[in-house]
Image: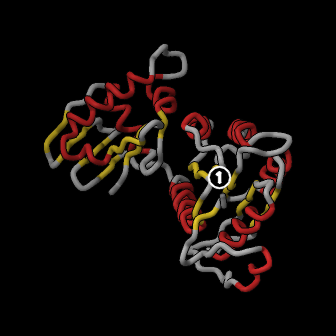
Amino acid sequence: MSVLTRDRDLPVVSRSGMAALDYSPRGPSRARILVVEDETDIADLVRHALERDGHGPVEVVTTGDEALRSAIDWRPDLIVLDLNLPVLSGFDVCRILRARPGTSSIPIVILTARAAETDRVSGLDLGADDFITKPFSLRELTARVRAVLRRARAEVEPPSAVYEGPLLRADFEGVAISVAGRPVDLTRREFDLLRCLVENRNRVLTRGRLLERVWGHDRPVEDRSVDVHMGRLRAKLGPAAVQIETVIGIGYRFTDQ
């Protein structure tokens, strides 16, 4: 089975037909992107799709150790990372990059044939910003890359202490939460959960990541505790609770929409 699905804007082509496509820049801003993929045909298609979307330069490497060297020396703005790699796995690459101060903030989009829930959770827990499974759409890949880059660039500025949404207003410094103008009383844990979700809005947070950030590393707390507290938080937020989405089998996401 092909690892690509067909797109109107980004058709699946053979390597010999790539030169006929128009790869003139269309994206709002350029980014240096490192593609880590050991299958040459897939790597070429991904590179050309990213260049067509306005990014560049786009560098391709095929092994985990090359990925580490390139990330450290070249400092890309984003990495598209396969998991099944020679020498070092994508999980190892992600873990090492996140542990190094110089590379810890580089956005990582995992692109892999490993579609098991445990793989998705492990990748996100290690710090990946998005997880795409093969077969995949080039159009979706470029859209997700743009979204991750937008989030990364927005995070250069410190998060605002006040969130203003359609119904929800959260003043985290003033410890004041209201929905449709009416104050809402939250427990300390519910408040911390909401703050964590809002400050990472539009990004999936696994239950493990929420436990780590809200409960701390050393607390013997089960994943079920996150679901229980999330249910209570949603009940108190009333109509504004629709902004907290459940990502089945993984965790939660706070969305602006």
Q: Secondary structure at mark 1?
A: strand
Could you tell me residue 195's position as x and y percent? 38, 38
Q: Which quadrant holds residue 74?
A: bottom right
Q: Quadrant of the C terminus?
A: bottom left
Residue drawn 45% across the image and 19% down it: 222
Identify the image quadrant of residue 24.
bottom right
Above or below 88: residue 19 = below
Quadrant location of the N terminus in the rendered image = bottom right
Rendered position, 38 above or below 236 = below
Q: Amino acid at mark 1?
A: Leu
Residue at 64% from the left image edge and 71% from the top image edge: 30
Q: How many marks?
A: 1
Is residue 60 shown left or right of residue 4? right
- Colour scheme in use: secondary structure
Residue that badge 1 annotates: 111
Residue 54 vertical placement versus 202 (above, below) = below
Q: Residue placed farthest to the top in the image?
A: 220
* In the displayed structure image, the side of residue 128 where residue 73 appears, left or right: right
Q: Please indicate whether residue 235 sits to the left or right of residue 174 in the image.
A: left
> Could you say which is closer to the camera, residue 191 or residue 225?
225
- The image quadrant of residue 48 is bottom right
From where the camera sits, is residue 108 visible?
A: no
